Image (tube, helix red, strand yellow):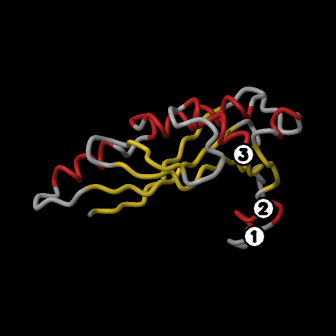
Amino acid sequence: MVQVEACWVAAQIVDGPQLTGAALGRYFTVDPHQGLFTQHDVAEALWIVPQRMRPTDGFHRLATAVVGYAPNVTRLPYPGAPFSERFSGRITSVTADLFPGDVLVSRVSAKLSAKATADLRPLLNDLQSLRSAKNVDVVDGLAREIAALSTG
């Protein structure tokens, strides 16, 4: 068995996020993400603090139904995700950061597994095809849901 941990990052401009809206509270817990700067001793005058958006049960329920999981999945990990012909696995993390200027950076992490073979080249080729979030339907769908729900 071959196991791989993968993380996809999708950056996009979102139009008019509603960080203080009541509707957003159903889908995300939003708070300042200062750890990006305090961990690296960046001078406070240089901070551009994003808002960390952590999905709630409401997000998980809605997003998993949209991307094809059974409805009412309310927690991570999302089991049984098809990533390619050879790789299946589970989504282990879904988060986002909203930076000033309406730049949304979404992250989806997963643990993938595939049957080991004597020739690993087909597996490596398959992994290369998974490099872009747009090439993986479930990851692309989750990134799109994050963007759609963040704008209210």
| Disc 1 to disc 3: CB gap under 8 Å | no
| Disc 1 to disc 2: CB gap under 8 Å | yes
Q: CA distance from mark 1 to mark 2?
A: 6 Å
Secondary structure of the residue carrying tag 1 is helix
Residue at (41%, 38%) from the top-left corner?
136
In this picture, residue 8 sits left or right of residue 45: left
| Disc 3 to disc 2: CB gap under 8 Å | no
Q: CA distance from mark 3 to mark 2?
A: 24 Å
Dot 2 corresponds to which residue? 34
Q: Nearer the viewer, residue 26 or 44?
A: 26
Q: Nearer the viewer, residue 63 or 139?
A: 63
Point out the tag, 1 or 3, that comes first from the N-terminus. Answer: 1
The x and y percentages for residue 134 are: 44, 34
Residue at (78%, 68%) from the top-left corner?
43
Residue at (41%, 41%) from the top-left corner?
132
Q: In which quarter of the view is residue 46 placed?
A: bottom right
In this picture, residue 37 sits left or right of residue 124: right
The dot on residue 38 is 1
In this picture, residue 32 sits left or right of residue 37: right
The amino acid type found where label 2 is placed reads Gln
Dot 3 corresponds to which residue? 57
* Number of other residues with Cα within 10 Å of mark 2, as a class: few under 14, some 14 to 19, many 20 or more: some
